[in-house]
Amino acid sequence: MSTLTEVKPVAGEIRESTDEQNEKRKLTESGTAAGTDDTPEAKRMRTDGSCENRESGYYFQNGLRKVYPYMFQYQVFAKGRWVGRTVLDVFSTEFRAHSKEYYEEAIKSGQIRVNGEPVDLTYRFKDNDKVTNETHRHEVPVIGCPIKIIYEDKNMLVVDKPPSIPVHPCSRYRLNSMLKILSEENGYSSLHTLHRLDRLTSGVLMFAKTKERSLFMDELIRTRHVTKQYLCRVRGEFPDGEITVAKPIEVYSYKIGVSGVKEGGRDCTTIFEKLSFNGKSSVVLARPKQGRMHQIRVHLQYLGHPIVRDPLYNDEAFGSNRAKGGLTEKTPEELVDELMKRHTLENWLTPMSDAELENRKATFGQANPSSDTPGSPATSSAEDFFKNYPENLEHYITDDFRKTLRGYDPSKMQYVESCPECQQRYIDPSPEDLTMYLHCYSYKGEDFEYTASWPNWAREDWVLD
């Protein structure tokens, strides 16, 4: 088995593959990625997104980074597939965060508007319609830790991304995204995303500070002058030697983000090599040649060794063999439906009694409540925050973070009567629940190499699978 040695960062930057550039473009079109292009199309893209009207911020509780709920206005231009469909049909089928009844009331009340004006339920979208939706935004918690900087100069910023945090604002994550955290807490604005990591993937994440550097990195990637290495812990004993998987991958659903090996899909190759085995699981080095969506995860599933704690490709929805050899008893459509049912937000909800709801209304916004109230988050101390903090995340924690940890402040909470999420109580996931054992360890070019910390779960003696 081979071993890896850590290297010091040297000057240089990276850009991701064409697939991931396309993903970035889609994000920009929905208003979630920052950019500085001043073409008419780019200007439209920047308005096709959202604008914030908020008093909010972060707090840390139960090992998690949380966001106080805030008012938020979504803005989007009508997509081509919306034209001719009613506003109620579009919202109830394309935006599944709320029920059809919720959107019906939001349209009637004028919360949802088209071209700045209220519309009725039967209004049909026209090309270039601008839609706004004023909502009380509740974000999903992520792992609570600071962002560790690996390397920085006037052109580049390289960080060690913690698991659970998406790169761009998306879906139920906005302030709890890498771009927003780096802006809000570290003062970095107008960063150019050079590549993406899945939300649950940790490790090397690079940004360009200038458009010129971003374009330069595009050329490096296009001409394949960059190599990348990932660490994975997978189920079972991985075979010895170098294992190459050259199997095409097809995206089954962009909406929930799931792919699979399928003939006729996009060609891609990943090279794997076992580093260690602890009697139950193996640490594997992965070197993907392309950047298809979930390429490493899908190819490991194909080999029969899915990644430990992978909530998608290590899920029983794929069958007892987890789609080993690309075989599953379900069609892609059936598989997507099953995964959507198994990973619904309702799994994190618990009923709230009338008394708890009244207590929440009464105490949210108070500066100094006399005690923690059922139905509202508990106050927290640094000691409580780290009580059950997992060992595999401790390398992200710094002394400064411990000293400046911000606990829950009830005065910053707000209750909105019409907000369905203010009526709900969510079960906090544990930080361990938000961890997948896939880590971007290094990116290397002709005159640079960046490496992230070696994760605890990749140690040869690790047994807490």
Image: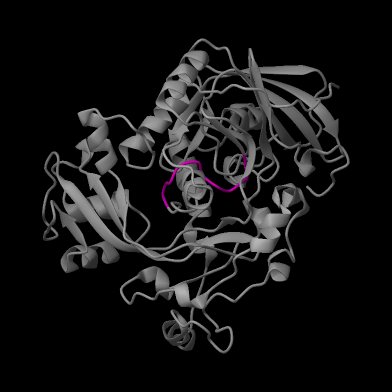
* Along the viewing direction, whichever of 299 and 4 lies nearer the viewer: 4
Q: Position of residue 125 (x, y in %)?
A: 14, 46
As for residue 168 lying within the magenta part, the answer is yes
- Looking at the image, residue 117 sits to the left or right of residue 380; the answer is left
As for residue 23 lying within the magenta part, the answer is no
Q: How is the image coloured?
A: one colour
Q: Residue at x 56, y 23 (%)?
A: 13
- Looking at the image, residue 233 sits to the left or right of residue 86; the answer is right
Q: Residue at x 81, y 25 (%)?
A: 5
Q: Residue at x 86, y 22 (%)?
A: 1
Q: Is residue 331 above or below residue 110?
A: above
Task: Answer with the quarter of the image where residue 386 lies.
Answer: bottom right
Q: Residue at x 43, y 39 (%)?
A: 333
* Along the viewing direction, whichever of 113 and 66 lies nearer the viewer: 66
Residue 265, visible in the rendered structure: no
- What secondary structure do most residues of the magenta stretch adopt? loop
* Along the viewing direction, whichever of 356 and 179 lies nearer the viewer: 179
Q: Position of residue 241 (x, y in %)?
A: 81, 18
Residue 11, visible in the rendered structure: yes
The magenta span reads: 160-171
- Looking at the image, residue 227 sits to the left or right of residue 139; the answer is right
Q: Position of residue 133 (x, y in %)?
A: 25, 57
Q: Residue furthest top?
A: 223
Instruction: Give the total number of marks visible in the rendering.
Output: 0
Q: Position of residue 124 (x, y in %)?
A: 12, 49
